[in-house]
Amino acid sequence: MVATPTPRVVYDWGMSRPDRHGRPLRNLRLSVTDRCNLRCAYCMPEQEYTWLPKPDILTFDEIERLVRIFVGVGVDKVRFTGGEPLLRQELPVLVERVARTPGLRDVAMTTNGILLADAADDLKRAGLHRVTVSLDTLREDRFRALTRRGGVDRVLAGIASLARAGFRGTRIDTVVMRGVNDDELLDLLDTAAEHDAELRFIEYMDVGGATGWSMEQVVPRDEILARLADARGPVEPLPAADATEAAAPAERFRLADGRAFGVIASTTAPFCARCDRSRLTADGHWYLCLYARLGVDLKGPLRAGATDDELRERLERTWAGRDDRGAEERLRAETRAALVARDDLRDDPRLEMHTRGG
């Protein structure tokens, strides 16, 4: 039996200036590098990539300043992303500088986990609150096929290191792909439970460099829930506890044994109506939607001498004019294939998932 998801509750978003659909700016995904040490098939499927020029990458001083300005217009959650954020040299130093920003209540990171075991203690001491680890399979042969590298044991060791370092609220993200890893749903749930982590199943999305994407590969939310219900008994939807959880991309559910998990149904049931997030690339371009083709250059005016007030006004004006509902538009499309052609990706690397922070 699969229970019908509880309707989302409309919350008072507070004082932040909303966009044209009444959505506040609360959540900033901060990419610190476009480089990655894996080559996951759904994120970096190509053999060669155009990398962002190193002189264009924001410095720690520039990042700290921009975060402070973002907080001044309503952001209270920052998530470090990449590429793989742990490839950025001295990342704990940057985490510490960002975490001390007045007004920030949540500082998190998403990582593939390969380098996590050696970094967990330093990240905790630096003030990082939470970590999400991407893990799509528990089988080394599949992991190697998916990532074209290998190292599932290193990822699991990284997840295990989080509890020892004192982290709580750990999440594991799994992109579910038909015929690839959709037979591991229960095993992944059990592994997450072993590490006191909450698993989130993510529908395969048609964004960035996923040039091999097709709808046939997507395992939709309803099918995921039905499979879990068949194997483990009734699945109960969990209502959002507060405004923060209401705006989160994952719908949360509970199994009969009390175990909670989430599903991010961006492909078949988009959450555009409650989306409060935006993305800053490692070279300072601000994207208001994961599906957006164009971003707003913040590095240019920053390095040209713009004041904090000028940059703040740019953020407020841009967000107030935001009308993006990219995932919903894709859902309504008559035909649906990969979002961006290979030639376009080579011409504009910021269209890549690994560049804009996923």
Image (cartoon, rainbow, N blue to C red):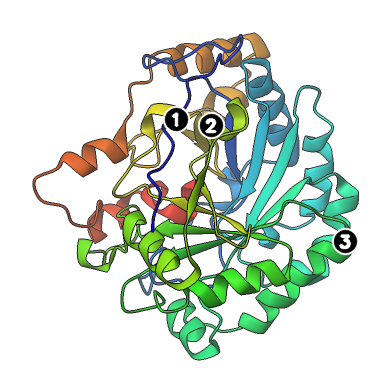
Please give the label number shown on residue 293: none
The residue type indicated by label 2 comes to Ala
**In the foreground, 119 or 18:** 18
Q: Nearer the viewer, mark 3 or mark 2?
A: 2
Q: Residue at x 21, y 66 (%)?
A: 216
Q: Earlier in the sequence, mark 2 or mark 1?
A: 1
The residue type indicated by label 1 comes to Arg
Q: Earlier in the sequence, mark 3 or mark 1?
A: 1
Quarter-of-image position of residue 203: bottom left
The reply to whether the C-beta atoms of the residues labelled 3 and 1 are less than 8 Å apart is no
Dot 1 surroundings within 10 Å: few (below 14), some, or many (20 or more)? Answer: few
Q: Position of residue 158 (x, y in %)?
A: 74, 71
Q: Which of the image's four quarters has the N terminus?
A: bottom left
Quarter-of-image position of residue 258: bottom right
Q: Position of residue 92 (x, y in %)?
A: 81, 52
The residue carrying mark 3 is 165
Dot 3 surroundings within 10 Å: few (below 14), some, or many (20 or more)? Answer: some
Please tell me whether mark 2 sits on a helix, a strand or a loop. helix
* Distance in Å between CA atoms under marks 3 and 2: 29 Å
Please tell me whether mark 1 sits on a helix, a strand or a loop. loop
- Residue 285, above or below 352: above
The residue type indicated by label 3 comes to Ala
Quarter-of-image position of residue 338: bottom left
Can the viewer see residue 115?
no
Q: Is residue 52 left or right of residue 60?
A: left
* Distance in Å between CA atoms under marks 3 and 1: 35 Å
- Residue 13, above or below 161: above
The reply to whether the C-beta atoms of the residues labelled 2 and 1 are less than 8 Å apart is yes
Q: Position of residue 283 (x, y in %)?
A: 55, 42
The residue carrying mark 2 is 246
The residue carrying mark 1 is 8
Q: Earlier in the sequence, mark 3 or mark 2?
A: 3
